């Protein structure tokens, strides 16, 4: 999500214009705060009062905590940038090369920091880069007045922050903690519905994927909302470590549900009927999950939900033990049935742990904890490239400015700095940049029409305020409707910046048109440089993939680390990657599904290793399993270096087939410890076989090259 974009409010319509009373109040509050900020800036005779009204709309957020967080980082970034810019002007105002060099250094530092940070910390870095550039170049044009430029900029932004924050805190405040609780509850219910779908063998795989794609974007919002709660009352604050645990448990449930459904679908496609007792045991789980998904009061009945899931898990675990001890079913049939039971038990157990973690996220007396590292932040090489790219765009524009002696250079610098916002922490700047540019052009045309044909008829600030209110009210309604929030927010920000003239009310359409051209041209230059110098987050995704295949899975296969720890680390890696993934892209979706499969596969590799160390297992089977696990570990480690379509999946299937043959050859007395170990190992082999024969995302992990990632 762009950092200057409000989070959609929970429970509001995402289609047509939202005209409920809360959104009307929101739009009215926003317009009143903006006009109050403009009036105060006029009264103080600040040079560019439009920055006060602009700041109000830049701080548009759906919660009090988010507005306070964004305002705090904006103020801090403005103060630091003003101090640096004044120093640069004082030292280098007489030397253009050194002045531009200092501006490039500042731009690099700010956008490098923005790429490494997350949420509004990244916004603070970007705002510092933007403000620093404006004060440096405006101050260099009149070094004696540089201090006044900096003071005015800080004052104007501070007024906007104060008006926006007070309006949000006094008029229908909506806390980030409240939004986070509601989002967690709705996501939990959606996950329960997802698990119910996974338990139905007839569910199409595409339907399960579509359902998963609606859940995952909600997980990305957890960390942002959690970080905003630090600015609210203690009882509204969510614990950072617990929220990380919540995200991991969500991913663990998705991984278990995915593995379970693959096995059920395989049985149905193969015409293999589940034992009647198992089919009967799964039905109560489906009904219970459906009730949880449909119950809006679920957050208040966590204990009841966990108790109900515990009873179902107990019944399924007991059924698995009975099937394991039966001697009238072939080994393959028993392994299939027990695998379904075990995967269902794990899925329901993870769902219960998730309910417990959610309950603990707002434990009384706990603070928000330390900010989470990772999240949407880019890795060091990517951040270096993004900082270098921003500095390069500035250098190219300054060369053009110097060569042409263009009188709208400051406007171009403004547009360039604004477009840089859209190019940080995104693999495709054009996806956000071109719509942003179009919204700015539309805002400039509308503002020009206003200045040329409407302002000459207005007299005094009262009529100006009335006109602005009539314009800003519908704009606020659009901002409060998630479907239009991005484009409406961008349009309104630039419209009010242009329509709020200087502290002397002297509309000048020609000067304004020249300014708009410079603004748009600067944005265009920045966007072209961003296209020519791509800076993506592919490297962190590639590292996560290689670490999972080459290190973590082999560790689980060799027994070097507990399988549960390996699975948790994989889900942690996936949780950190989530904000960087666009599931509409085939490669990103395959990476997510493949890492989910790796997390659940790590558990099964650990089970196989545990079986192999049990002395009750017949010696031939133990040797076969130990040898097969060593072979799998070597194959996983070599997998990413293989060419696409190479043989590691086939070699891994051969290793599984060798272990399976050894298990079938052992004729153990039914009900004995050895027989139970054979069935348990066969169950894990069946799961791993699914990964290598049916799970294309897992099979194709090695072929995910940089272009797809």
Image (cartoon, helix red, strand yellow):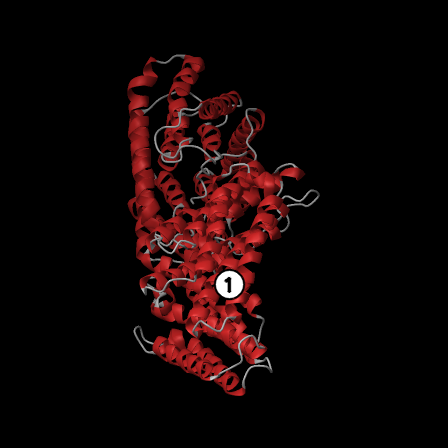
At x 36%, y 50%, the residue is 210
* Residue lying at 39% horizontally and 58% vertically, measured from the top left: 536
In which quadrant will I find the N terminus? top left
Tell me residue 600's x, y (percent). 48, 64
The C terminus sits in image quarter: bottom left
Q: Is residue 617 above or below residue 248?
A: below
From this view, report whether residue 167 is shown above or below residue 119.
Answer: above
**Picture residue at 30% right of the left edge, 44% below the top:** 434
- Which residue corresponds to mark 1? 342
Instruction: Decide: few, some or many residues near mark 1? Use Cα within 10 Å; few <14, some 14-19, many ≥20.
Output: some
In depth, the one of 92 and 168 nearer the eye is: 168
The relative height of residue 353 versus residue 475 in the rendered view (above or below) is below
- Residue at far front of view: 328
In the displayed structure image, the side of residue 528 where residue 665 appears, left or right: right
> Is residue 556 at all visible to an observer of this figure?
no
- Position above or below: 65 against 423: above
**Is residue 143 among the parts visible in the rendering?**
yes
As drawn, which residue projects farthest toward the right? 365
Task: Judge by depth and name the residue closer to the eye, 534 or 357.
Answer: 357
Q: Nearer the viewer, residue 1 or 124?
A: 1
Taking the image as shown, residue 192 lies to the left or right of residue 707, namely right
| Rendered location of residue 93, percent (x, y) | 47, 46
Q: Position of residue 228 (x, y in %)?
A: 56, 41
178 horizontally vs 197: left or right: right
User: Number of labelled discs?
Assistant: 1
**Residue 678: image location, x then y, percent:** 51, 77
Query: Which of 616 and 654 lies nearest the eye of the viewer?
Result: 616
Disc 1 element = helix
């Amino acid at each position: 999500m762009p950092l200057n974009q409000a989070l959609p409010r929970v429970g509001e319509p995402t289609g047509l214009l939202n005209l409920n009373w809360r959104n009307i109040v929101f739009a009215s509050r926003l317009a009143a705060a903006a006009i109050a900020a403009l009036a105060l800036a006029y009264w103080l005779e600040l040079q560019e009062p439009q920055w006060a009204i602009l700041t109000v709309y830049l701080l548009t957020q759906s919660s009090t905590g988010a507005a306070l967080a964004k305002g705090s980082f904006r103020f801090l970034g403005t103060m630091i940038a003003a101090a640096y810019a004044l120093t640069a002007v004082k030292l280098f105002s007489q030397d253009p090369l050194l002045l531009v060099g200092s501006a490039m250094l500042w731009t690099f530092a700010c956008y490098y920091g923005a790429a490494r940070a997350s949420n509004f910390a990244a916004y603070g870095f970007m705002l510092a880069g933007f403000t620093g550039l404006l004060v440096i170049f405006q101050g260099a044009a009149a070094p004696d007045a540089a201090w006044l430029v900096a003071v005015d900029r800080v004052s104007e932004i501070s007024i906007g922050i104060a008006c926006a924050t007070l309006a949000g805190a006094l008029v229908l405040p909506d806390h980030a903690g409240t939004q986070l609780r509601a989002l967690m509850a709705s996501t939990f219910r959606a996950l329960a519905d997802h698990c119910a779908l996974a338990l139905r063998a007839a569910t199409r795989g595409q339907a399960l994927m579509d359902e998963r794609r609606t859940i995952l974007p909600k997980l990305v919002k957890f960390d942002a909302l959690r970080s905003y709660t630090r600015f609210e009352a203690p009882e509204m604050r969510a614990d950072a470590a617990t929220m990380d645990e919540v995200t991991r448990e969500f991913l663990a449930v998705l991984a278990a549900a995915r593995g379970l459904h693959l096995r059920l679908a395989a049985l149905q496609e193969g015409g293999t009927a589940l034992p009647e007792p198992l089919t009967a045991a799964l039905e109560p789980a489906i009904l219970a999950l459906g009730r949880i998904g449909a119950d809006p009061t679920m957050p208040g009945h966590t204990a009841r939900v966990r108790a109900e899931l515990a009873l179902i898990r107990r019944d399924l675990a007991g059924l698995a033990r009975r099937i394991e001890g039966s001697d009238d079913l072939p080994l393959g049939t028993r392994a299939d049935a027990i695998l379904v039971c075990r995967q269902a038990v794990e899925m329901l157990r993870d769902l219960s742990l998730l309910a417990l973690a959610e309950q603990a996220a707002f434990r009384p007396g706990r603070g928000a904890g330390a900010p989470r590292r990772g999240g949407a932040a880019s890795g060091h090489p990517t951040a270096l490239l993004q900082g270098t790219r921003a500095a390069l765009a500035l250098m190219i524009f300054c060369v053009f400015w110097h060569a042409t002696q263009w009188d709208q250079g400051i406007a171009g610098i403004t547009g360039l700095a604004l477009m840089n916002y859209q190019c940080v922490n995104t693999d495709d700047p054009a996806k956000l940049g071109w719509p942003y540019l179009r919204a700015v052009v539309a805002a400039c045309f509308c503002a020009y029409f206003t200045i040329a044909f409407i302002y000459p008829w207005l007299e005094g600030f009262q009529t100006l305020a009335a006109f602005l209110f009539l314009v800003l009210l519908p704009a606020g309604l659009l901002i409060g409707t998630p479907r239009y929030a991005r484009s409406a927010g961008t349009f309104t920000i630039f419209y009010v910046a242009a329509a709020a003239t200087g502290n002397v009310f002297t509309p000048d359409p020609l000067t304004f048109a020249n300014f708009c051209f410079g603004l748009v041209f600067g944005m265009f230059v920045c966007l072209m440089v961003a296209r020519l110098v791509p800076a993506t987050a592919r490297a962190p995704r590639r590292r996560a993939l290689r670490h999972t295949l080459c290190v973590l899975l082999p560790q689980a296969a060799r027994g070097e680390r507990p399988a549960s720890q390996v699975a948790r680390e994989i889900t942690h890696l996936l949780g950190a990657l989530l904000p960087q993934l666009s599931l509409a892209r085939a490669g990103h979706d395959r990476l997510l599904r493949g890492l989910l499969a790796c997390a659940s596969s790590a558990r099964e590799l650990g089970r196989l290793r545990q079986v192999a160390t049990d002395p009750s297992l017949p010696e031939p089977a133990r040797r076969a399993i130990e040898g097969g696990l060593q072979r799998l570990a070597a194959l996983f480690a070599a997998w990413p270096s293989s060419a696409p379509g190479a043989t590691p999946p086939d070699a891994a299937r051969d290793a599984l087939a060798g272990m399976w043959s050894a298990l079938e050859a052992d004729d153990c007395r039914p009900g004995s410890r050895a027989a139970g170990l054979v069935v348990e190992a066969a169950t894990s082999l069946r799961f791993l076989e699914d990964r290598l024969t049916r799970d294309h995302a897992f099979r194709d992990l090695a072929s995910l090259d940089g272009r797809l990632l």
